[in-house]
């Protein structure tokens, strides 16, 4: 059992860990994708580096700093987060972990595929959360767009609800997954069509496939995807938090780009610090009864 699991190893997540780790809380950072920081070529507007520093250098320094104080850092893709009474279970591509506190710090990824019609049918057959909307597709034929662990996790949520499921990899390699009512189609998608709701997917080779609904699970799940699954309040493509970085669910905090506002390192570090300090106080309250 961990005290704190932080999802994301960018400046927000690492900053939170520096406080929880130094408070002697058992802390784990889980990450999969590159941080936006790692992709930044050069930084000259961050305090303490008179000659600037590359984003990759700063990213690596932060992770090493966390590891040096005993924070565990593991590269594992998080596929699901579940609430269990007063704790949380984190499922990854490698296994499961339990924790008292979750801090979401995966940035603000844009996992929406560039497919014509996808935005037009959002809420009318296009969904981004199987656990939220799967119920509406009982005994129907549906599709899941994606080719990785996150897509498979969504399929597993839907497999006992829908009659038939098609995994649409959109030109990517087919995942290693087999089930009686699941088919895999690797063709590139041209567009999504329908009248009042989704009715079919058309492919670039001119073929088409009928479907009653589409669940988008492209790439790796980010903070927004987890928030929707957990019932965390979101709005305008960001997670809603209070001044203490608390979400509406006790024990879950969010910080960094996923909370909107300035997409700057200084803002991410501040919010990570705040989330870490609040997590310490929350866990001490739990332990003191």
Image (cartoon, grey):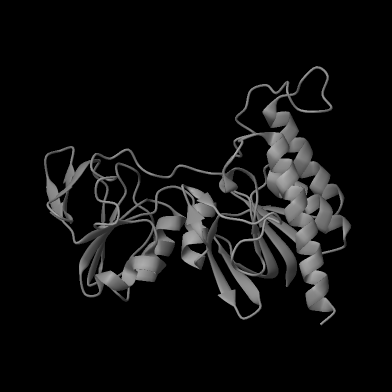
Q: Quadrant of the N terminus?
A: bottom right
- The residue lying furthest to the front in this view is 243
- Tell me if 222 is positioned left or right of 97 in this view: left
Q: In the figure, is residue 143 to the left or right of 257?
A: left
Q: Position of residue 135 (x, y in %)?
A: 31, 73
Q: Residue at x 24, y 50 (%)?
A: 121
Location of residue 238 in the rendering, given as x and y in whole percent from the top left corner: 52, 49
| Quarter occupied by the C terminus | bottom right
Residue 156, visible in the rendered structure: no
Residue 167 in sight: yes
Tell me where residue 162 appears, x and y as whole percent. Answer: 26, 71
Determine whether, in the image, residue 164 is placed left or right of residue 43: left
Residue 99 at x, y percent in the picture: 69, 70
Q: Is residue 276 above or below residue 236?
A: below
Residue at horizontal 47 percent and vertical 52 percent from the top: 235
Q: Is residue 8 above or below residue 58?
A: below
Along the line of sight, the residue nearer the viewer: 40 or 60? 40
Number of numbered discs on residues? 0
Q: Picture quarter containing residue 244?
A: bottom right
Q: Is residue 9 left or right of residue 208?
A: right
Residue lying furthest top: 51
Question: Residue at left 59%, top 36%?
Answer: 36
34 vs 39: above or below: below
Of residues 138 and 252, the one nearer the viewer is 252
């Amino acid at each position: 059992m961990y005290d704190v699991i932080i999802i994301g190893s960018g400046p927000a997540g690492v900053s939170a860990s520096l406080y929880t780790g130094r408070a002697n809380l058992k802390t784990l950072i889980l990450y999969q994708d590159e941080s936006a920081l790692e992709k930044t070529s050069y930084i000259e507007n961050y305090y303490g580096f008179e000659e600037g520093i590359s984003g990759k250098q700063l990213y690596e320094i932060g992770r090493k700093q966390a590891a040096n104080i005993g924070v565990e850092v593991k590269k594992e893709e998080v596929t699901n987060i579940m609430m269990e009474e007063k704790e949380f279970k984190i499922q990854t591509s490698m296994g499961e972990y339990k924790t008292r506190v979750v801090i979401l710090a995966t940035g603000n990824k844009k996992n929406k595929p560039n497919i014509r019609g996808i935005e037009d049918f959002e809420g009318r057959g296009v969904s981004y959360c199987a656990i939220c909307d799967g119920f509406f597709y009982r005994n129907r034929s549906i599709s899941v767009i994606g080719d990785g662990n996150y897509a498979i996790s969504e399929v597993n949520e839907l497999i006992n609800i829908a009659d038939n499921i098609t995994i649409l990899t959109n030109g990517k390699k087919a995942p290693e997954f087999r089930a009686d009512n699941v088919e895999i189609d690797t063709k590139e998608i041209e567009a999504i069509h329908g009248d009042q709701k989704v009715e079919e997917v058309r492919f670039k080779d001119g073929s088409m496939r009928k479907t009653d609904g589409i669940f988008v699970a492209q790439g790796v799940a980010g903070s927004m995807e987890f928030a929707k699954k957990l019932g965390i309040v979101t709005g305008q493509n960001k997670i809603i938090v209070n001044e203490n970085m608390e979400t509406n669910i006790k024990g879950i905090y969010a910080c960094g780009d996923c909370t909107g506002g300035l997409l700057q390192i200084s803002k991410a570090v501040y919010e990570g610090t705040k989330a870490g300090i609040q997590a310490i106080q929350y866990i001490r309250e739990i332990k003191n009864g």
